Amino acid sequence: MEQHSIFTKIINREIPASIVFETDDIIVINDISPKAPVHILIIPKKQIATINDIADEDIPLMGKIIAAAKQVAIQLGIADDGYRLVMNCNDFGGQTVWHLHCHMLGGKKLGWTPD
């Protein structure tokens, strides 16, 4: 049986989180260790381990992640100034939670690295 990620536990309300936005397919939460004034995580409710595990049937869900990013950027007032979206994949890519998610960073001018 597949082990539930910390994000699945948040989605199931087993662990508290600061929820910014939610749809039937996506949950958006504040990152607990922010690297910018705005640092949120856009998480599909379907647990997909890595970018490499995206199936053809998941492609519409990936579009919903981007659509949620746009909506949340407007909601948080960072859309006009700009923001960064980052998805890490596997160990060398910096992935630490095996549930695909997208980081949104903004609220300041970002250099090549977020810090």
Image (cartoon, helix red, strand yellow):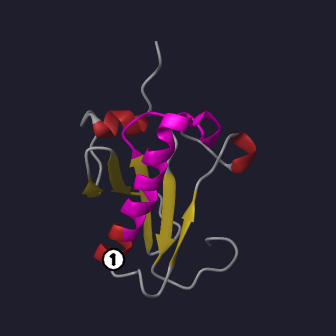
Toward the right, the furthest residue is: 92
Disc 1 residue type? Ile
Q: Is residue 15 above or below residue 17?
A: above
- Would you say 4 lies left or right of 92 here? left
Instruction: Answer whether residue 81 is visible to the viewer in this image.
Output: yes
Query: Along the line of sight, which residue is nearer the eye, 63 or 33?
Result: 63
**Residue at left 32%, top 39%?**
10
Residue 1: horizontal and vertical position, in percent?
46, 12
Q: Is residue 66 above or below residue 112?
A: above
Query: Along the line of sight, which residue is nearer the eye, 22 or 40?
Result: 22
Location of the C terminus by quadrant is bottom right
Residue bounds of the magenta highlight: 44-70
**Residue at left 36%, top 39%?**
45
51 magenta-colored = yes
Q: Is residue 28 above or below residue 84?
A: above
**Residue at left 50%, top 55%?**
102
**Helix, strand or loop for disc 1:** helix
- Would you say 115 lies left or right of 29 here? right
**Residue at left 40%, top 69%?**
70
